[in-house]
Image (cartoon, rainbow, N blue to C red):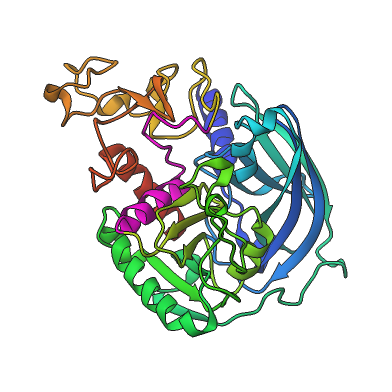
Amino acid sequence: MKKTTLLLLFLTQIVFSQPKFEDFFIEKTLRLDFYHTGDKETEIITFDKLIEEPIWSGSHKNLIDKFKYGNYMLRVYDSVSNSIIYSRGFSTLYQEWQTTEEARHIQRSMSGAVIMPFPKSMVRVEIYKRDRRNNFEKKFEYNVDPQSYFIIKEPVKPYPNFQVHYSGAPSQKLDIVIIPEGYTEDEMDKFRDDCNRFAGYLFEYSPFKEYSEKINIWGVEAPSPESGTDIPGKNIWARTLLNSRFYTFDSERYLMTTDYHSIRDLAANAPNDQIFILVNTPKYGGGGIYNYYNVTSVDHQSSKQVFVHEFGHGLAGLADEYGDDPTYQDFYPPEIEPWEPNITTLVNFESKWKNLVEKDTPIPTPDEEHYKSKIGAFEGAGYVPKGVFRSTHNSIMRAFSSNEFNQVSKEILEKIILSYTE
């Protein structure tokens, strides 16, 4: 029995041990660009190029993803030992598009990219995607020789950066890079002011204000030829660096871009664990996707709440907790527990926040006055009114009438912040 216990302990340590950064990587970033192509039911990922970037701002300790959030998973294997040396979950705009009506009728391609610490030796890069049952299926594999002369080393879009909020060495902090969209050369002072304003907004909210000393915020001075952004429904078009637009997926307020390679080109000018795009427009809108990018318009009266709400998506994979958006179809199958940590179908409620529910709170929880301050399972979330549940009556992930994250989301955000800073 003693030998069996020791063996299990040894195997557990192997499974949960993290690789040593200095054994496998150097202080640079390797970026692999690709394209998604397909329709509602199909997807192929095709290789585009490799780029060497001068900064690695990610953790040196947490190289293997502890959370396993996201619709995709990047895994990097050492070619000699065949051991996994880096992984990171993420989501994409392409996977969202696959749940729209348009995806039933046409095929599309969208740009994508993954980043990793620059390897010392040959590695195998694999990208996995969740199937309808939330199991990861391999979609892409590519062998990388870090000595290859085809790896692009020149800066693709070089622009100066500046510190908005600095706390310390990037490898021990959560680094947020703010990119301007639709700011002309003459509006760079406005962009700097907006960076300071939105950094201030972030630190008004828990848990960010409690962990401000663990966060760096950077800006990149990258002017656009014209001010503003595209508004297709109003026949307004602007020449901007990132080609952003409202009416993404024909949802007027959804302000995004499919030009992900350009986003990563600009982000490469500063340390970046998270990318936030400020769009120089007063029109209401924004968007955010986990470990991908976040967007908000800057001059609407609700821009502060949009900024914080979208960052909840991008940083921690928080789902929308409202239940009334017809843009997406069958986004959360009722028979599968979503990977998003703040919603549930009750298929596997034990894996979510069941431990925080008081014994006398019924599940599902009636959306009544008596339970408005309780943690429970309130029906209506994930864009549908039935079958998907949230933890509280309201929160900033549901409506701006609540100007804070609920307890479940705060605890998740805290864990994510600490994972970058350990």
| Left or right position of 178 against 112 | left
Task: Report x, y in % for residue 147.
Answer: 84, 67
Q: Is residue 76 left or right of residue 251?
A: right
Q: Residue furthest left?
A: 370
Tell me where residue 360 appears, x and y as whole percent: 16, 16
Q: What is the count of numbered marks?
A: 0
Question: Is residue 181 visible in the rendered structure shown here?
Answer: yes
Q: Position of residue 132 (x, y in %)?
A: 62, 23
Q: Residue furthest right?
A: 149
Q: Indicate the quadrant containing the C terminus: top left, top right, bottom left or bottom right.
A: bottom left
Residue at the spot 23% in from the left edge and 29% down from the top edge: 375
Q: Residue 316 magenta-drawn? A: yes
Kindly give the residue lying farthest to the front in the view shown. 235
- Kindly identify the residue that appears in the image at 60 percent across and 57 percent down: 20
Q: Nearer the viewer, residue 373 or 191?
A: 191
Quarter-of-image position of residue 156: bottom right
Relative vertical location of residue 277 with respect to residue 398 in this rendering, above or below? below
Q: Residue at x 46, y 73 (%)?
A: 218
Query: Does residue 62 appear to the left or right of 55 in the view shown?
Result: left
**Is the residue 32 above or below the residue 196 in the image?**
above
Residue 155 image offset from top left, x and y in percent: 71, 76
**Rendering quarter of residue 158:** bottom right
Residue shown at 23% from the left, 43% from the top: 402
Q: Can residue 122 be seen?
A: no
- In magenta segment, residue 57: no
Task: Read off the magenta span.
Answer: 301-327
Instruction: Left or right? Give the position of 177 relative to 168.
Output: right
